[in-house]
């Protein structure tokens, strides 16, 4: 049996920075509230309206291919996790494959909101473990600024844009992706979703008027469910692999709110020095938070480090993955 190991990482965030003081001019909020309630100081916004999610994903993939020194023609498959596809009909992955010259890759999308990267990562690693695919790219990318209502202070302070990508390849050793525990509960959908533009509420003047094309979130419900869900699945994956929290070198949680990250770390009993956090700089980039953290902190991960990735998102969808670096 082959394991799937990460052999390359790429990332991209737009240059344009939206600070808390910028938001103070747009809605009734203040920087102290945002920092104390969320930990976010600034986020990146794709300001160039001629660009979209596929462009950020393509920049991340090109960065990955350059770092890993891999020819685009060698890639067998790409999977992109996104909730902000360029178009409803056609995969964003097919556009990324074309933009990056991945002429031999098949390409598809995964939609699991903030858990999207973890779900796609498991699908990608399973393809590698099957021995049928040798080089699989998994991307998390979201242009949240396209679905955020910048007049709604409950949501507009939280989200940012960005993309991260990893290359998975087989290894004969025992490193790589070891195990995952994932959950989905569709009852959660009413608490976090974009109601308009799909088959339930096709886009129309009425859906625009009712602002159904924007993110709707019941923050408190999601907050509590996120702490519970990530803590439970991290605990389950540790138990299943006979690991104690002391064996974990790095916890890389989805970055939705610093208080959620802190509460999960506390519940698991891991010191913050072993938890990767970059929410202060990027906000919540949905499917991109985990690969962006891998990209930001890649120099810190050493061979055989035990790494736990965990996420919670709309759906609800959540889970934890254990990998040996
Ligand atoms: N500035 C100032 N005040 C605000 C703001 C703001 N930007 N936003 C809300 N408030 C007010 C509210 O109106 C409320 O006032 P009230 O008490 O008079 O009604 C008060 O602050 C407290 O509001 P809460 O919603 O209770 O604040 P909370 O501490 O829960 O923080 C937040 C809100 C940050 C949204 C938090 O609930 C959260 O992070 N939720 C989870 C987000 C998440 O994890 N999402 C999942 C992933 S996203 C995905 O999958 C796409």
Image: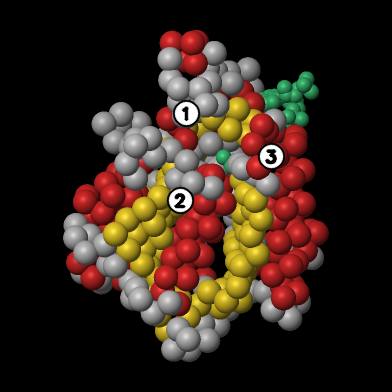
Q: CA distance from mark 1 to mark 3?
A: 19 Å
The mark closer to the camera, 1 or 3, is 1
Direction front: furthest residue: 199
Q: Circle 3 is placed at which residue position?
A: 188
**Residue 152's x, y, as percent?**
59, 21
What element does badge 1 sit on?
loop
Mark with earlier residue (1, 2): 2
Left or right of 292, for residue 79 = left
Q: Circle 1 is placed at which residue position?
A: 199
**Residue 235's x, y, as percent?**
75, 66
Along the viewing direction, whichever of 160 and 4 lies nearer the viewer? 4
Left or right of 3, for residue 184 = right
**Residue 83's x, y, as percent?**
47, 41
Disc 1: CA contacts within 10 A as few (<14), some (14-19) or many (>=20): few
- Residue at 68% x, 33% y is 191
- Residue at 61% x, 23% y is 153
Left or right of 146, for residue 313 = right
């Amino acid at each position: 049996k082959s394991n799937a190991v990460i052999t390359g990482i790429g990332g991209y965030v737009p240059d344009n920075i939206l600070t808390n003081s910028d938001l103070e001019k747009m809605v009734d909020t203040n920087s102290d509230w945002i920092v104390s309630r969320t930990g976010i100081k600034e986020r990146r916004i794709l300001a160039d309206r001629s660009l979209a999610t596929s462009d950020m994903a393509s920049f991340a993939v090109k960065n990955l291919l350059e770092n890993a020194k891999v020819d685009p023609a060698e890639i067998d498959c790409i999977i992109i996790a996104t909730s902000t596809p360029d178009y409803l009909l056609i995969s964003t992955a097919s556009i990324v494959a074309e933009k990056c010259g991945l002429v031999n890759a098949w390409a598809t999308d995964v939609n699991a909101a903030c858990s999207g990267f973890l779900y796609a990562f498991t699908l990608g690693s399973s393809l590698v473990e099957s021995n049928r695919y040798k080089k699989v790219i998994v991307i998390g990318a979201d242009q949240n600024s396209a679905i955020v209502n910048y007049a709604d202070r409950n949501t507009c302070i939280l989200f940012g844009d960005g993309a991260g990508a990893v290359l998975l390849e087989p290894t004969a050793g025992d490193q790589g992706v070891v195990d995952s525990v994932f959950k989905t509960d569709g009852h959660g959908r009413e608490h976090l979703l974009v109601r308009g533009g799909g088959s339930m509420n096709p886009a129309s003047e009425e859906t625009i008027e009712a602002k159904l094309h924007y993110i709707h979130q019941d923050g408190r419900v999601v907050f509590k469910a996120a702490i519970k869900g990530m803590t439970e699945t991290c605990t389950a994956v540790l138990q299943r692999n006979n690991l104690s929290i002391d064996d974990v070198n790095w916890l890389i949680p989805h970055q939705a709110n610093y208080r959620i990250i802190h509460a999960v770390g506390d519940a698991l009993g891991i010191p913050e020095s072993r938890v990767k956090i970059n929410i202060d700089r990027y906000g919540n980039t949905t499917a991109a938070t985990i690969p962006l953290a891998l990209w930001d902190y890649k120099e810190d991960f050493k061979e055989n480090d035990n790494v736990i990735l965990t996420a919670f998102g709309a759906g609800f969808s959540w889970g934890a993955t254990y990998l040996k670096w």
